Image (spheres, grey):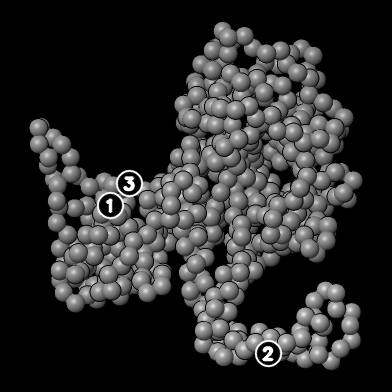
Amino acid sequence: MERKHMSAFALYQTISPETPPPAKKPSLQVAQKKKKRKKENGVSKINKPQFNPEVKKKRKKPLNAPQREERFEELKELQQEEEECVNGDGEDLNALLADISKINNSRERASKLFQWLINPIPAKTFFKETWEKKPILVQRKNPHYYRGLFSTAEFDRILRQEDVQYGVNLDVTSYTNGKRETHNPPGRALPFTVWDFFESGCSLRMLNPQAFSSNVWNVLSILQEQFGSMAGANVYLTPPGTQGFAPHYDDIEAFVVQLEGKKHWRVYNPRTEDEILPVLSSPNFNQADIGKPILEVVLEAGDLLYFPRGFIHQGDCLPDAHSLHITVSSYQKNSWGDLLQKLVPAALEVATEEDVEFRQGLPLDYLTYMGVQNSDMENPRRTKFFSRIESLMKKLINYAPVDAAVDQKARGFLHDCLPPMLTPEELASSVQGAPARWERGQVVDVGKQITTQTRVRLLRAGCARLCSDGEAVRLYHTTDNSRVYHKEEPKSFEMNAEHTDAMEFLIHSYPKFVTVGSFPCDSAEDKISLAELLFERGIIRTAEPL
């Protein structure tokens, strides 16, 4: 008999006879062609689902130990069946990742993966018309579209096999009667306690799934090249008929990817201009604070919802299904203002050193007419003071070390980055796959030589960057980063002066392979020395395995 597909967590639960029958699926208007879209308040207009917020989840009877073991055995069997299924578009995520691993340029890989994420919206159109401007909804009617990215079975595996800590890797939350609460006990999050919280109506938020899931790590490590900014993720598992978080806005661009079940979402405009593209996330809001939603929708598996930072949002589960979604995020602290925070102090330091006007003393009596207590005073000295400030500010641009400030931002980005998850070809041709080993009582294939004829290139387009550090030049890189955010210090080393031109040559040659002999160094010894250093650090790969 053919087994009916169930979500992984549904196996953990049993449906009691008192549970109300599933609500009829809401009919949502899907508008994928621009000419057919009707706009309301800047977002695609949809038919609102019939949703009754008064319906609350009835708590199911907890499973006893034998029942739990039986459920988890069934879970494992069905997860194996799921892994054999193919995405409704003819290609699951693992197949897609295998396909794009064959693309020669890592930036092109990132572009193709991002296009898969937001399909069928063209990426160029998205960044021109939607990015940082308004929410957008993609409804696919294909529950398998994101299959392979993450699942409740993977969630359970991580709890069983990994060191998941409450408050560090996992939050247990609830939102009832307008009150948001966190219920994290101390210590490790073990399945026995975590699933009991879930059965009691609590939501589970996994804060850094990329540290535990290879596919999430792979996807984010590729997408960070598309954004030029850290790509992060949280996973949210919510019981039927519950809500885990209060209305709020975030300081990131959010891509809500529905993986299992369904969730009712409401999105609201920023309340004031000050809250458009905010620097920080908001506190929790009361329902009375946020007005009416500009978008209300039920996301089902395979759907995508994007909203920019500053757009207030809240999501709750319908009574007939749990919800599993992953939020992919980027562009935190990546604004012009963030760059200027690094640029202006540096410009002021240079100007003070080089321009006597910035070193001249303030007027003897400026405290008598400047400052808040004198701000309503009509005094020509105030006008003259502001004029002098304006003149100095205009001169400041001439001393602004823009490239150095950008390099400061770049160093932070490279520290934020995930390390690359290597493709089979990258592994075979880099230090991580070098053949040196112990075999039959001796070391073999050690010390394989790089010569001037060896063809090399950077491992990935954005994996290394030259930055000035005072009088020295350092090479910052991502290849030794941790999958855990900032677990390690920034990775860099000082470059010898005779190697900096060759390093620039390598960076700008990507994605082409170049011979070590073509490096612009003074001697063959310098060329080979640099290639060996970069190879040992995992920053370059060879065209053919050594």
In this rendering, the count of numbered labels is 3
Residue at the image position 15 percent from the left and 63 percent from the top? 451
Compared to 371, does 119 lie above or below? above
> Which residue does the numbered mark 1 point to in the structure image?
430
- Image coords of residue 8 (percent x, y): 58, 25
- The residue most toward the front is 364
Q: Is mark 2 on a helix, strand or loop?
A: helix
For discs 3 and 1, the disc positioned in front in the rendered view: 1
- Image coords of residue 79 (percent x, y): 51, 26
Residue at the image position 49 percent from the left and 30 percent from the top? 163
**Which amino acid type is shown beneath numbered disc 3?**
Pro
> Which residue does the numbered mark 3 point to in the structure image?
424
- Image coords of residue 527 (percent x, y): 20, 69
Q: Is mark 1 on a helix, strand or loop?
A: loop
Q: Distance between the residues labelled 2 and 3?
A: 58 Å
Q: Is residue 110 visible?
A: no
* Rendered-image quadrant of the N terminus: top right
Q: How far apart are marks 2 and 1 (CA)?
A: 55 Å
For discs 2 and 3, the disc positioned in front in the rendered view: 2
In the image, is 62 to the left or to the right of 164?
Answer: right
Which numbered disc flags the more N-terminal residue, 2 or 3? 2
- The residue most toward the left is 441
Residue in the foreground of this view, choosing between 101 and 451: 451
Residue in the foreground of this view, choosing between 195 and 187: 187
For discs 2 and 1, the disc positioned in front in the rendered view: 2
Residue in the foreground of this view, choosing between 211 and 227: 211
**Which amino acid type is shown beneath numbered disc 1?**
Ser
> Which residue does the numbered mark 2 point to in the structure image?
391
